[in-house]
Amino acid sequence: NLKDFSPNSFFTRTAYVWVYLSVLIAFLCVAADTYTAITLLVFNRWSSQIRPIIPFDVAKIIFALCIGLSYALYVVDWWHAAGVINRGGVADAYMDSIALRWHSIRGGAGKEDPGWKRFLVFARLTEKRGRRDYVALFTYFSFKGWMRVLFAEGPRVAINTVTLVSVIRADLIPDDATEALGAIGRFFENIGHLYSENRVQALILGAMTFTTIFWLFTIVRLTIACNMYLCYLIRAIGETSLEDYCRKRIDERMTEIVDENHKQGMRKDDFRQPTIPVISTPVGTGTPTDGNLFTESPVTYLHRQPT
């Protein structure tokens, strides 16, 4: 019952906000990549001062192919997530990032099944875990999408990097104005100069910068997950695969939550049971005493526990 779940900390609300932010960031990355790919295909060349190592014609073809591969992998991910959403399993939805966000934002049918309540179920699944479980879940979710990170995003990030380095080295503003600037300051000064001359070119470079920074965070997370798996998890979980281990632990945690909610419901039912008056009479008399005419005694019921 979704009514049994309620927020219990500030971090739960913060995590729910992050669900929306993660969707926004993912959308911005896709939009930036799409804009860059389309613009590069119709773009002829960089500014004469920008001379990247990879030729422009080769770079834009590689970039377009990588974007196409990214879209193909997105379609596969959404196809898998659609099956998870239709099945409606909690553990399956928890282990699929797209399905988790879908349930957390859209919810179910009717006002009694909002996305916020479904997110609270996922939040409870994350609570009260040992170190091994947290490491396993972090590693599992970090490995999700590794093919897209390495093969679809890696080559175009390499193109982005050599292009952005060329922008830093470009002589677009007087030397006396850049002597006091570092590499980052020089980069933004050159971008500003390019924007005043060719806005399309500056926007492409800005999109490249955004996706490159986001990819760096992703690859750092993937590297940490690989080290955790090789140095710790591969021995901690034994011969069980990482996915099977996470699924088993999620199912066990879900069973614990259902049992906890069931016991809490039993205690509430016992507390809300009707009471009956008990007439107290002194020994040897047939009339009630004036000091204690009625005392309320709760009626106790035996509830059959699930077997």
Image (cartoon, rainbow, N blue to C red):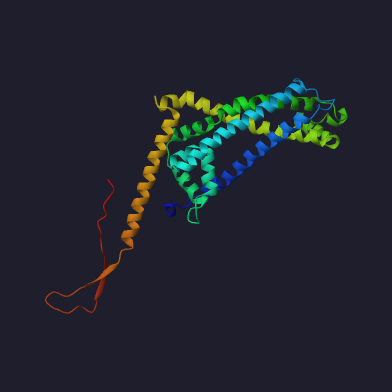
Residue 67 position (above or below residue 86): above
Q: Can residue 229 be spotted in the picture?
A: yes
Query: Quadrant of residue 71 in the image?
Result: top right
**Residue lying farthest left?**
284
Q: Can residue 161 be spotted in the picture?
A: no
Number of disc labels: 0
Q: Position of residue 229 (x, y in %)?
A: 48, 26
Seen at 48% across and 34% down, the residue is 137
Residue 176 position (above or below residue 121): above
Q: Position of residue 205 (x, y in %)?
A: 75, 32
Q: Is residue 51 left or right of residue 120?
A: right
Seen at 25% across and 74% down, the residue is 294
The residue closer to the viewer here, 206 or 216, is: 206
Seen at 11% across and 76% down, the residue is 284
Seen at 45% across and 27% down, the residue is 233
Q: Is residue 40 left or right of residue 306?
A: right
Q: Is residue 218 left or right of residue 127?
A: right
The residue closer to the viewer here, 53 or 185, is: 53
Q: Position of residue 64 (x, y in %)?
A: 69, 28
Query: Quadrant of residue 247 in the image?
Result: top left
Q: Quadrant of the C terminus?
A: top left
Residue 282 position (above or below residue 74): below
